[in-house]
Image (spheres, rainbow, N blue to C red):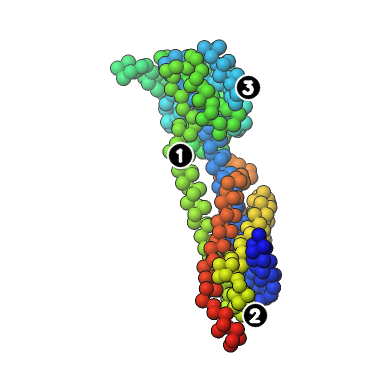
């Protein structure tokens, strides 16, 4: 314990004591470099998490559900109640997916994924209701021939609420029994979500209307959870529930595995690439600690002369590097949190400064904008700070400083007390 105390005492004195030539400049620059790196990486990851979690949430709440139950038999009302009463289950809703071609009154055509749902879905599926924004008209599926379509899909077809639209599909079961179907529906409204693919390809019709296209189709049941990360636990409980034998069940992780894996790979690669900033900071710390070892060669020799081991002396400089890494990580995490949570205000300040500079030069170009809500259907930049990300970022920053200090401190092994004290 005493050995650790004197190592920390000397390391902190070295850190606080001015250097012979540059004072505290080297330490301040090292801490600042780590802090800027941590702040930058935290900001980038928080914004990326915000967009990715927005995509995941929109896909799960609108299209894929948290858990899907599919099979050749319908769930009885009693079985649905049993599922709803399970811990963590928020809603159970039946639906049928139909691939069709939509044709507007101007003869424009587009492929679409039609989902037949219960007309009262907005009342009992709160997650769905929160993520669907009606841009025009109403979400009304009370009439069997009513339809609500994505705003971008409606724009491409040149239709709006009150217009009629034709749904073209093949009805029947089995290739030999298929026959063309062309039905006319009344557009009741258009919607937007936070995901362009949903806005441009999806439409909703009443569940009763699905049998006009696919009278023998099996109904799929979508289950919404209070916490979608508990899907594996709920799946285990569902498989033990009597009455669900022989039905196929899968969670949102499996249903969207390819897309979510791509998002994860994108995040990992971004973290690795931006983490390279710590390599530059580590080189700076290495040269700073290397100079520190050379400048303190007499003190190193004196510590060796009074009995300090090479490992203990090396630990002094490693501890000094750890102090630099810790302070840089701490300041960076605090700054990163403040900047990230106010990222929209920061963007606004930058946009104002740039536009003021451009206006002073009489630039005729449009106003500069870092983020435009019209492009993403979001008025503000979404952010989500994840604790594992913060731990990873600060750990990498701290380790880069410690490793750099360790490499630089290896020079103490070549110091010979007798020679140094004789000539110095």
Alpha-carbon span between mark 1 and mark 2: 55 Å
Question: Residue at label 1?
Answer: 259
What's the residue at 36%, 17% (across, down)?
Answer: 173
Tag 1: Cα neighbours inside 10 Å, few (<14), some, or many (≥20)? Answer: few
**Residue lying at the far left of the rendered structure:** 176
Residue occupying image coordinates x 42% and y 26%: 99
* Residue identified by numbered label 3: 123
352 left or right of 231 in image: right
- Relative height, residue 247 to residue 310 (above, below): above
Q: Please state which of the two labelled residues, at mark 3 or mark 1, is closer to the viewer.
A: 1
- Any part of residue 183 in sight: no
- Which numbered circle lies on residue 21? 2
Q: Are marks 3 and 1 in contact (CB under 8 Å)?
A: no
Q: Nearer the viewer, residue 319 or 166?
A: 319
Dot 1 or dot 2: first in sequence order is 2
Residue displayed at 54% across by 42% down: 52
Q: Nearer the viewer, mark 1 or mark 2?
A: 2
First in residue order: circle 3 vs circle 2: 2
């Amino acid at each position: 314990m005493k050995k650790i105390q004197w190592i920390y005492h000397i390391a902190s004195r070295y850190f606080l004591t001015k250097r012979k030539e540059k004072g505290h400049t080297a330490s301040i620059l090292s801490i600042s470099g780590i802090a800027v790196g941590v702040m930058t990486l935290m900001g980038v990851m928080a914004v990326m998490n915000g967009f990715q979690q927005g995509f995941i949430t929109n896909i799960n709440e609108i299209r894929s559900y948290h858990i899907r139950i599919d099979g050749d038999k319908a769930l009885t009302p009693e079985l649905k109640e049993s599922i709803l009463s399970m811990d963590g289950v928020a809603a159970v809703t039946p639906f049928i997916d139909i691939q069709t071609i939509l044709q507007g009154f101007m003869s424009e055509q587009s492929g679409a994924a039609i989902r037949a749902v219960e007309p009262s879905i907005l009342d009992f599926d709160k997650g769905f209701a929160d993520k669907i924004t009606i841009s025009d008209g109403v979400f009304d599926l009370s009439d069997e021939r009513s339809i609500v379509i994505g705003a971008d899909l409606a724009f491409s077809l040149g239709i709006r609420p009150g217009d009629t639209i034709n749904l073209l599909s093949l009805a029947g079961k089995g290739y030999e029994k298929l026959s063309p179907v062309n039905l006319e529906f009344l557009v009741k409204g258009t919607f937007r979500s936070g995901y362009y693919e949903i806005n441009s390809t999806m439409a909703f019709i009443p569940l009763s209307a699905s049998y006009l296209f696919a009278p023998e189709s099996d109904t799929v049941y979508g289950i919404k959870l209070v916490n979608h990360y508990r899907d594996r636990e709920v799946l285990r409980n569902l498989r033990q529930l009597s009455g669900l034998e022989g039905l196929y069940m899968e969670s949102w992780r499996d249903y969207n595995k390819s897309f979510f894996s791509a998002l994860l790979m994108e995040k990992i690669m971004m973290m690795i690439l931006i983490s390279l900033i710590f390599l530059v900071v580590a080189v700076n710390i290495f040269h700073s600690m290397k100079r520190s070892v050379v400048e303190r060669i007499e003190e190193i020799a004196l510590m060796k002369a009074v009995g300090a081991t090479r490992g203990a002396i090396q630990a002094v400089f490693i501890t000094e590097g750890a102090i630099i890494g810790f302070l840089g990580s701490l300041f960076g995490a605090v700054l990163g949190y403040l900047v990230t949570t106010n990222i929209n205000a920061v963007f606004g300040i930058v946009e104002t400064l740039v536009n003021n500079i451009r206006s002073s030069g009489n630039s005729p170009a449009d106003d500069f904008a870092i983020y435009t809500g019209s492009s993403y259907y979001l008025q503000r930049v979404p952010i989500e700070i994840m604790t594992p990300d913060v731990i990873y970022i600060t750990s990498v920053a701290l380790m880069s400083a410690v490793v750099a200090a360790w490499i630089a401190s290896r020079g103490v092994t070549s110091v010979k007390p007798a020679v140094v004290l004789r000539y110095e």
